[in-house]
Image (cartoon, helix red, strand yellow):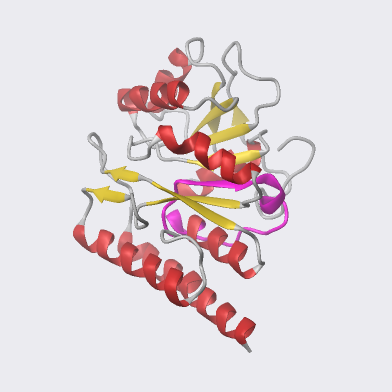
């Protein structure tokens, strides 16, 4: 981060290795888009080009890989001269998608930080609308599959079912104002990230943790409808059985916090 580190994002003495930024990148971007990757290879090309063309807010694109031999790295380095604001980042916090997201967030320079997936499942066209909601005061802006106008195309049935049940029950009974708290396609304000310590330990639970913490802290959580499309190439790294207990922890925290506020 510029000038300071948000608590919980990087341990003392640890640093992520940044790659050169493309020519024409904004000096201080308003938005930082963080994309964790794992051997995406050429399949990342349409994703990066789509984000660059579809997002008008001045931004940087930070592609984060765990090791220098990742097949995404040479593709990104080839595209750096072509795509404004694009740069690569080696995650030195430890392997895995959670550490990659944390490394990208820690290295981001924008006032707003968006986490998106590199598999083409997320919609670039709604990003500017998410930024607008953040400028209006939202500290978390969720792309929502489960509100009116949103939907999910494809993906494993059990994963879709659990995600929908968790999201809607948290919305209706735990006071979480987005219908889709588990979706990692989310935008966060820097002021919010600087105010909390990340405790997530595995995988994609980060989005749920940050949404629950924002809700319990009385921060504004907003949402926009999105159409999520399952990846057309490669294989998902989502590990439902290993990560489910971590999701359940933050699910319980949301209800515990709700009952405490009610009392």
* Quarter containing the N terminus: top right
Q: Position of residue 131 (x, y in %)?
A: 57, 39
Tell me: 201 left or right of 107.
left
Tell whether position 1 is magenta. Answer: no
Q: Position of residue 65 (x, y in %)?
A: 47, 34
Q: Position of residue 219 (x, y in %)?
A: 65, 61
* Quarter containing the C terminus: bottom right
Pick out the residue farthest to the bottom: 263
Residue at 62% of width from left, 51% of height from top? 138
The answer, for residue 251, to whether it is visible in the render is yes
Q: Is residue 76 above or below residue 243?
A: above
Q: Nearer the viewer, residue 74 or 249?
A: 249
Residue at 27% of width from left, 60% of height from top? 159
Residue at 48% of width from left, 52% of height from top? 223
Q: Nearer the viewer, residue 103 or 50?
A: 50
Q: Residue 120: which quarter of the image?
A: top left
The answer, for residue 93, to whether it is visible in the render is no
Label total for image: 0
Tell whether position 195 is magenta. Answer: yes
Q: Position of residue 11 (x, y in %)?
A: 68, 50
Residue at 41% of width from left, 53% of height from top? 183
Q: Nearer the viewer, residue 228 or 68?
A: 228
Pick out the residue farthest to the right: 3
Tell me: 96 left or right of 30.
left
Tell me: 256 left or right of 151.
right
Q: Nearer the viewer, residue 133 or 143?
A: 133
**Residue segment shown in magenta:** 182-206
């Amino acid at each position: 981060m510029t000038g300071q580190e948000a608590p919980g994002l990087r341990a003392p003495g640890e640093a992520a290795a940044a790659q050169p930024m493309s020519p024409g990148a904004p000096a201080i971007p308003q938005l930082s888009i963080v994309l964790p990757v794992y051997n995406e290879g050429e399949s990342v090309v349409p994703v990066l080009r789509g984000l660059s063309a579809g997002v008008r807010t001045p931004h940087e694109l930070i592609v984060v890989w765990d090791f220098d031999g990742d097949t995404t790295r040479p593709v990104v380095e080839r595209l750096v001269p072509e795509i404004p604001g694009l740069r690569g980042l080696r995650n030195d916090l430890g392997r895995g998608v959670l550490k990659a997201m944390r490394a990208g967030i820690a290295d981001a320079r924008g006032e707003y930080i968006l986490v998106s997936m590199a598999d083409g499942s997320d919609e670039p066209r709604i990003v500017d609308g998410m930024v607008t909601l953040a400028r209006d005061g939202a500290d978390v802006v969720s792309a929502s599959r489960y509100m009116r106008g949103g939907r999910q195309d494809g993906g494993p049935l059990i994963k879709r079912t659990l995600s929908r049940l968790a999201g809607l029950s948290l919305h209706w009974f735990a006071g979480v104002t987005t219908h889709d708290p588990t979706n990692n396609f989310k935008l966060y304000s820097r002021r919010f990230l600087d105010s909390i310590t990340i405790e997530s330990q595995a995988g994609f639970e980060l989005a749920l943790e940050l949404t629950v913490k924002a809700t319990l802290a009385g921060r504004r959580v907003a949402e926009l409808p999105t159409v999520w499309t399952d990846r057309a190439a490669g294989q998902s790294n989502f590990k439902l059985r290993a990560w489910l207990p971590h999701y359940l922890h933050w699910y319980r925290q949301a209800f515990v916090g709700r009952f405490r506020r009610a009392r």
